[in-house]
Structures are given as structure tokens and as C-alpha cells.
Amino acid sequence: MGEFSRLVTPLNCCITEPLPMGGQIEYEDFPCTIDVTGPLLYTLFQERWEETQIGHVVEGSVLELEFTQPPKICIIYDGYLTVVTEAWHLHLCLEEHLGGPLAKTPPELRQQRLIHRASLYRRLNERGDPRSWGIQFWNGAGEKMMNLFLPNPFLGEDEDLLPEGKPQHSKLSLYKELRDIYVLGIRPIPFENNPLKRPYLSVCRSSRCYPSRNWQPIIEALQEAVKEAGMDVYVMTSGCLEVCKMGPVVFYSGDRTWYTRVNPDVARRIVREHLVQGQPIKNHLYPRVKEG
């Protein structure tokens, strides 16, 4: 991966498609690399969550979800962005999903699952007037994936239609801001680095591989070691990390490393030797490293 750039190179690709009931939808494509989609989705889910709705739209069904508070978790694990709220969670493939530590996902399936096209869109009525705004993603098979609904100036706080001729145009500020940054490239991404690539350490709390579930000492050891090292690494717990019956398991996102049979002493060594010195602890790695 190259150096993070705060300026997006425009694709200059605008596609208009007719709608079955009249009107049309206008798509403005933007790059779907992780250094574009990462900051975009972090902004919407972590910072502008009150203005963002998530949906999936196909003929005959529509799903719409909204945030009632910031998500508890917003990370990337094995290519998938995972966002967790109190009531629901989502997964969206932003990088190749390799299929855990053994990389079981076939290459063609990795490409199918990955976002291959991303667009900011406007739905226009028969007169050509915009009536809704959002973001659409497509996978490698050309199928529509997740849909993000942006604030609509024609809707009130309870999703009721506002009086005719009295739209709240201020609600379009988020759409205009995203368009300037990600479609037109005339404003910089509002982060110095990709916020979804901040490294983290995750401890599996699954009872399948660690029946006692006494993961708290491991978490504390990692947190203490990270603090002592002065590193900006987030420490968290997670569900299954795909290395069953070999717990406690620790995953380091910085270089996609899985550790097994971790105790507090090994946890401290992971930080001191691997994260600080760049020397993984070979006898706890999964899969095991064959000696040359």
C-alpha cells in the first residue's frame, strides 16, 4: 500500500439510468480503494452517525437502519469493515477477505466479495428535480451491495414529508461535503491517515476455544504493555478469531498476525518483541512458522 493521500483523484465518471416508474438516477463514481472508502465510512459511521442511515434496496424489498448512538465497534478484520451497535451490526468488504489465518477464501470469491464500484447518487423525478441522495456500492459480480441514505431536505425529523415548497436545504451539506472530497477532489480528506487502518490487538473471548473465558488478565497485560511502549494501538475483545480450540487467541491487525495459547507474559512479549522490535514470537504464531 502506498503513502496515504488526502486528495482523491476524480474518476470523472457520471452515469444516468432511467427508473422504472419515471425519472432517473444519477451516479457519480469515486475510487473504492481502502484509503478512500475507509475515511468516508469512518466519517459517516463514527462522526456523522446521526445523519446516516444504512439500507439495502432491491426490487420488492427495502431495509433501512439508523443509529441511535455512535457504534461500539468500527474496525476492519480480514478485509471486512465491522460496525456494531447496541441493536444490530453490519459487515462490508473493503479489502480482500482472505479467509482467516489459513487464507481459505478462493481468489475468485475474494474478488466477488470486494467493493468494485462506489458512487454518490441522486434520484431525480420526471421533471429532473433531485428527490433523494445517497451512496451505492457494488461487488465484483456487479451486484448492488449496501446503500447509505444521506439527509433528505424534503423530510422532517420523523421522516414525514415537509410542506410543499419548504425544503430544509441545509440538510444537503453532508452530501455536498462528501461530493467535494470524494467525487470532485477539490477538498482534502479530513484525516492525516486512514482512520480505519489504525492498528489494534484483539483478544478472543469465545468459549469454544477458551472455556474459562478468563481473558481479562490478557487484556490488561496488553493494555499495560502498549501504554509503556507509548504506542497508538487499540486493545479490545472480540468474538471468534477463526483459530478454534487453541485459545487464548490474540490477533494483531497491523500485519494480520494470529497468536495462540497466550497468557499475560506472552501478551507483554507480543507488544515488546513484535510490535516494538518487529520480531514475532514464533512458537505462539498461527499457523506455526516452519523453521528454515
Image (cartoon, grey):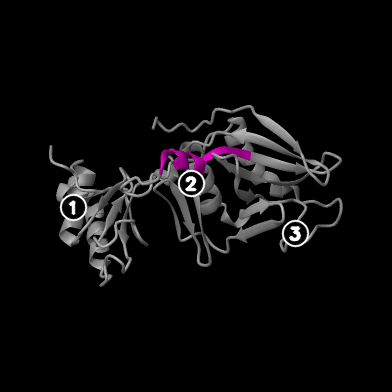
- The mark closer to the camera, 3 or 2, is 2
Label at residue 93: 2
The numbered mark, 2 or 1, whose residue comes first in the sequence reads: 2
The numbered mark, 1 or 3, whose residue comes first in the sequence reads: 3
Disc 3 residue type (three-letter) = Gly
Tell me the element at label 2: strand
- Residue bearing mark 3: 156
- Residue bearing mark 1: 284
Q: Where, quadrant-wise, is the C terminus in this rendering?
A: top left
Disc 1 residue type (three-letter) = His
Residue bounds of the magenta highlight: 106-119
The numbered mark, 3 or 2, whose residue comes first in the sequence reads: 2
Residue closest to the eye, 237 or 175: 237
- The mark closer to the camera, 1 or 3, is 1
Residue closest to the eye, 25 or 3: 25
Residue visible at 18% across and 61% down in the picture: 264
x and y percentages locating residue 212 in the rendered image:
25, 72
Residue visible at 45% across and 42% down in the picture: 110
